[in-house]
Amino acid sequence: MTGVTRWWWVRHAPVVGNGGRIHGQDDVPCDTSDTRAFQALAAALPADAVWVTSPLARAVDTAKAITAAGVPARLSIVESDLAEQNFGRWQGLRWKDVEAADDPASKAFWRAPGLNAPPGGESFADLARRVAAVMGRLTADHAGADIVAVTHGGTIRGALTLALALEPGQALSIKVDNLSLTRINHVSDAVAARRGGAWRVVGVNVPTR
């Protein structure tokens, strides 16, 4: 018998006054004023799902706005390991300034941005490992269920790293828009898993309206 656990990944609403800055694990507010966008997400997501968010306010507030638009959560979980990548001393800076900086840490990072950590932070590969651990645990705990995960662009790329068996640098090329939907299924049937792995990517960066 084949069992399918369905992951529905949503990137949080746009950050207020982004300005091209690196937010990482800084707890910054998001704009939840686009009522139609949240209604569209509520219509696209399954009822009676398990909901999980990162602990950062922009993910939690986005999840609240979606459920308020008409799709209540059966169970809500906050997972610290689904937070965005920790960019250390670069958090709050603008990407263009980091890229232009004439310092060894910046030059080292850009040689392999999927594997190297910003100063005082973690690498994308580190993020992908912690996301994979959460996916494995929650898939086992809620086998056969729908799991709605409201998180971050980096977190969703981490999920796709696992599902597609990507190298970290490859995953960084995937575009993940705010309030887009990415769907990944886990198939528990052993024969199906041997035909290409247990994970099936249904859609990436899907607009909901």
Image: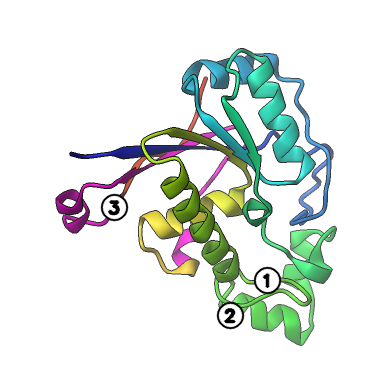
Q: Residue at x 51, y 60 (%)?
A: 133
Residue position for label 2: 111
The three-letter amino acid code for the residue at tag 2 is Arg
Quadrant location, the N terminus:
top left
Instruction: Indicate the amino acid at tag 1.
Output: Glu
Task: Let me know if residue 173 is in the magenta part.
Answer: yes
Q: Which residue is mark 1?
A: 122
Can residue 84 be seen here? The reply is: yes
- The residue identified by callout 3 is 198
Crowd band around label 3 with a 10 angstrom C-alpha radius: few (<14), some (14–19), many (20+): some
Residue 177 is situated, as x and y percent measured from the top left of the image, at 58, 39
| Percent of width and height locating residue 63 | 67, 30
Q: In screen coordinates, is 54 left or right of 125?
A: right
Q: Say which element carries label 2.
A: helix
> Residue shown at 39%/41% (left/top)?
143
Residue type beneath disc 3: Ala
Labels 1 & 3 near each other (Cβ < 8 A): no
Q: Quadrant of residue 33?
A: top right
Mark 2 or mark 1: which comes first in sequence? Answer: 2
**Residue 171 on the magenta segment:** yes
* Marker count (numbered): 3
Which residue is farthest bottom?
104
Numbered disc 3: secondary structure: loop
Residue 38 placement, left or right of 120 = left
Residues at marks 2 and 1, CA–CA distance in whole angstroms? 15 Å
- Residue sitting nearer the eye, 94 or 159: 159
Q: Of residues 116 and 81, which is closer to you in this image?
A: 81
**Discs 3/2, front:** 3
